[in-house]
Every structure is written in structure tokens, then in C-alpha cells.
Image (cartoon, helix red, strand yellow):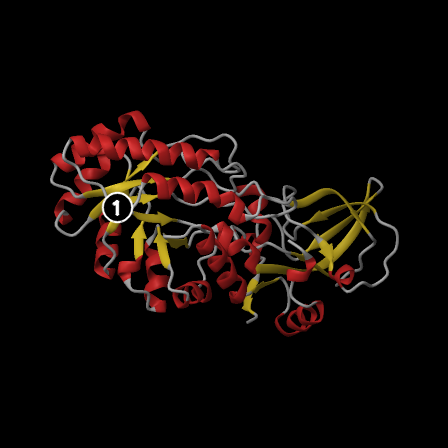
Amino acid sequence: MSTSSLPDPSRMRALAAEHGTPLLLLSTQTIRQQYRTLKQALPGVQLHYALKPLPHPAVVQAIKDEGGYFDLATNGEVDIVRGVGVDPSRCIQSHPIKRDSDIRYCLEYGCRTFIFDNPYELPKFLPYKDQVELLMRLSFRNKEAQCDLSLKFGVQPQDGLELMRKAVGMGLKVRGLSFHAGSQLLNNFKYIEAISFCRQLFNLAALDGIRLDTVDIGGGYPVPYTDQVMPIHYYCHPIAAELERLFPGVRLIAEPGRFIAAPAMTLVASVMGKAERQGRMWYYLDDGLYGSYSGKLYDHCDYQFMPLSKLEGKASGPEKLSVVAGPTCDSIDVIYNDIMLPELECGELVTSPMMGAYTSASATDFNFFPRATIVVVD
């Protein structure tokens, strides 16, 4: 992410003075731009924003205004889209494992499309079989992904036809297939492999009289954190071409989360204190691994980090090997162990871009340090 896409430093200072720190500055214009960019890269595909990485009403409103769709996994996410006034027909419920109360809650809202991936889930839908329509999630393991999202969910491809037959035999309506190739996936080949197998399964199902009409290709589209990634239009070109070739006239769904959310928030934090230990300066921030930097633990992610003064072009002293730690009394709460920084002063503001995905969503109030306040800046 270039510094040109960051909020203006003077505005960051003004907002920090007004609200205190830590702050996450949310740009809904960035949300809109990311949505439009991916929509152009995947023509004919319904983009269902996955709320998981950034479940904020302003994000939902921006995507709703763009005519977008939504991917829900929990009752809390249902509450957010319902509160913004999203038409339930524009939503799917994608969590493969559900309680009866979850199914009822979603149906009461009006969302009727659910995902399943194993035979133990099927009886849960029987009381509602006249209301629900199902997509079957397939597992395509991917060690290259930052997060392999086929580890925990999905039926093995070779078992998919049998599971589909079982669902249909129970009187349930199966409309299509779903998969997730992996989060922050730098290589797009896994999509091509999965799409090709879905076509084979479509054909086998048709021989059994099961007419499928939907393919959900999930999320995983990469964004540049500390390294550049392939531009999204190049990344998606072979995916879009394969979908057009193999699935003409079929309803196509994608579930982008990170791609839309990650560039939309910038963190502003403060240096609470500093100390010299074993020849290195330690800086203690008012945000850390239990807060907005939780993505370093749970999302296997890294973020750029810089003093705000650097963005302002102010002169600084020589850089030294330093440690950046969070505010809690837990020794695991160290954000950067070896980072080159000029000497920072207590109260100095620091910033990290690309903090929209899996940051505030997985943050806690551990040790009673409150999580960062989200401020919408446009």
C-alpha cells in the first residue's frame, strides 16, 4: 500500500487529538473502490461481501449502496445487515456448521440459502426443507494459502456426489457448489483446479437428475501488505475466463472479505513509554497483539509500521534496532522484535496502513486496555 493512499497526516493528528488513541480510520470510499475494482475483474459474478474480517455497519452500507451482496456466518452478522436494511434475498448463510436456532434466525430474517459440507448437517434442515436451498461446500486443501480454509470445512471432492445424492434423497433442494481456495492466496491456480472439478461434479449430478445452477468460488483474493501482489485484474483474468467457458448461464458467487476490507482502515496509535533493554530501545504502544495487531497472531499477517512524523517528511535521527510492544502485562504482546526505527518519544504517534481485515474483528479488551475506536473518515 503506497503512502499516497493513507489519510492525510494532519488529519490523523487532528482525529487523534479529538478521539484519543488507538484509532482505526475507516474509509468507505476505499471500500467502494475495492468493490468496484473486483467487480470489474470478475464480470458476471455476484460479490457477496464476507462480513467476518470487518463487520461494520458503514462498510455494509457502502456495499449496499453499490448494489452488492453479502455473505453471513453468524446471527450477529444477520443483525448488522438487517440493521442497515439489506434485502435478505441478497444474502447467503455460509457457515457449514449450524444450530437449529441459527437456521431459524436466518430464515426469520428472510435469508434462505445455506451451505453444508457433511451428512450430520442435513437432518437440521428437514423441518425447513420447503424454505431452504443449499450449496455443498467442497474441500480443496492448499498449503500455499496464508490461511488454508479447507482444513476445517468442506467435503472431500471424491465424496461430493454421494453427499449430494443423500441430501436430495432426503427431499432437500441442492442448488449448487461452493469452495474456498484459501485466504490471501498469491497463486490463482487453485481456483482453476476447483472450478474444473465443479464442472465435472455438475455433469455427474446431471446424470443423476440433479440440476445445479449455482457456483460459489469463495474469497481469498490477495492484497499488498508488506509485499506487492499481482494486480487483481491480472489475477482474476484466468478465473473469469474459466467461469465463462465452463459455466455459461450459471449463477456465479464470490465471497470477498479481505480484498475489500484490508485497505480501508489505517491505525493510529501512541507511544505510551519506552525503555532500553539489552542494548535495544523498547517502545510500548497503546495497541498491540491483543488489540488491532491481533492479525499477526490469528491471520498470520504482517503490517507496515512507521512514525507519523515520517509521513510528514520531518527529519529524524539515525535508525536503531528496536522492539515495539503492546500495552498489556503479557510478555507475548510484542508486535515487532527487530525493527529499525529512529528514536521515538513518549506520546509520539505511529501508524500502520492496511489494517481493515482481521484486526478490530479479532481484537479484545484483555487487561482492560480498550480496543481501538473506529472512526469513519468519509
Comparing 125 with 5, the one in front is 5
Pick the front one: 181 or 194: 194
Outermost residue, top side: 158
User: x, y percentage for residue 169?
Assistant: 12, 34
Place residue 287 in its image quadrant: bottom right
If the image is split into quadrants, where does the C terminus sit?
bottom right
Query: Camera-side residue: 100 or 333?
Result: 100
Residue 22's spot in the image, x, y percent? 62, 62
Q: Position of residue 67 (x, y in %)?
A: 37, 64
Drawn side of residue 193 relative to residue 86, left or right: right
In-image side of 162 versus 287 (left or right):
left
* Name of the residue lying farthest toward the right: 317
The residue tagged with tag 1: helix, strand or loop?
loop
| Numbered circles on residues, count | 1
For residue 366, say whether it is visible: yes
According to the picture, the residue beneath numbered tag 1 turns out to be 99
Q: Position of residue 41 (x, y in %)?
A: 47, 51
Q: Is residue 151 visible?
A: no
Around disc 1, counting alpha carbons within 10 Å, would you say few (fewer than 14), some (14 to 19), or many (20 or more)? few
For the point 46% across and 38% down, which residue is it?
182
